Amino acid sequence: SALSDVARCGHAMKLVLVLALGACAMLGQATDPGRPLLPLRTKPASRKPRLLNKSAVGQAVLCTLAVQNACQMLSMRYSRMPGQPRYLTSTAVVLAELVKMISSFAILAMQEGLGRAAWIVWTGLVLNWKDTLLVGVPALLYLVQNNLLYVATTHLDAATCQVAYQLKLLTTAFFTVLLLKRQIPQRRWLALGLLFIGVVFVQLPSGGTSRASQSPILGTASVAAACLLSGLAGVWLEKIVKSTAQVPIWLRNLQLGSLSLILGLIQIAFFDGRAVRAAGFFQGYSWLTAFVVMQVSLGGLLVALVMKYADNVVKGFATSLSIVLSSVVSLFIPSFQFSLTPAFMAGSTLVIAATILYSTLPTPATDDRRQPLPASYAHGLTELKLV
């Protein structure tokens, strides 16, 4: 039953949290003191602010990101299972953008103060409307990508979707070379090749039966298209950011969110307007749907903090750990009907190895390394920075 599945999921999450804490302790052993988690606006003060220990921050970031990544796919998958209330995914995408905008403004207000934050938003979002319109294409791509992820989790189990979604590294590398004319070391191409082979292994038919309402082919096509759009949107946005004046990442987040919100409402009016008029905007919503919305929205903000105050190594390890967590938790939920096949285990191992190899390779020093964080990291489902 649904209640027993939730109970099993709770016990499984306790187990994987213990495993995650152990992995975090192994990762952050020998590191130097770092920067504060949230850099506030500098003010004259009689004493210096205390800096957080970078080792502790790295461990906390790894645990939080790994659990969030795993929970996002698991909760999205469970909310789309047969028997669950059917909600409109288009409304969930719009609500996630709204929560993301509110959270971004709250963080900006923490850093700059409420009055100054409101002035920054008014100036950057309304008065400089041409700069806002520049991110219209990435906003549209992100909107379509988020809708495709709901389709993918409807037709694929959470673990398979989690592994397949790592193809976004490959698409990001391709568009980085194509649009930014940036060279990628051969060893990273090797890692991306291993990643592709691993995803192919995971997608091999397992010989089991699937539900009549599910189409593995449609799910695979959706996650592949989401990876393609994610890579294109992230690199496109990075190119915009590097060619325009410096904009705070939280303001850029608000610019993206506002356009995505408008486009999302247009999408609802055209495709789901009749359903909304018949049963309401929040039809089929439950506590699980609200949890999914929060996961999608706040997960993007977490990635922004990770990439600003941690590094690619932490993100790579977190991605690998999230694959393990998704697989373990899926085994504890009978309604998922998930089993570890040899092909899945081999493919997951290759994907994890490729992700770690890609993240831990040394990056040559360039002039770009001290530039502001590209806003693509702040918006949501984004990729490792390729330099």
Image (cartoon, helix red, strand yellow):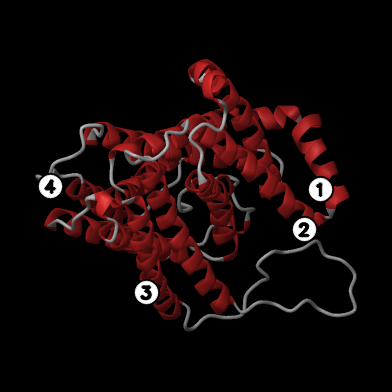
- Label 2, secondary structure: give it: helix
Amino acid on which the number 2 mark rests in the picture: Gln
Q: Is residue 232 visible?
A: no
- Label 4, secondary structure: give it: loop
Amino acid on which the number 4 mark rests in the picture: Ser
Foreground residue among 61 and 242: 61
**In the displayed structure, does residue 347 sit left or right of residue 352?**
left
Q: Give the residue at x 51% y 38%.
A: 285
User: CB of mark 1 within 8 Å of CB of mark 3?
Assistant: no
Residue with the mark numbered 1 = 117
- Which circle's residue, 1 or 3, is located before the other in the chain? 3
Q: Give the residue at x 25% y 32%.
A: 213
Residue with the mark numbered 4 = 206
Q: Residues within 10 Å of mark 4 (few under 14, many from 20)?
A: few
**In the displayed structure, does residue 99 sit left or right of residue 322?**
right
- Which circle's residue, 1 or 4, is located before the other in the chain? 1
C-alpha separation, residue under disc 3 versus residue under disc 4: 28 Å
C-alpha separation, residue under disc 2 versus residue under disc 1: 8 Å
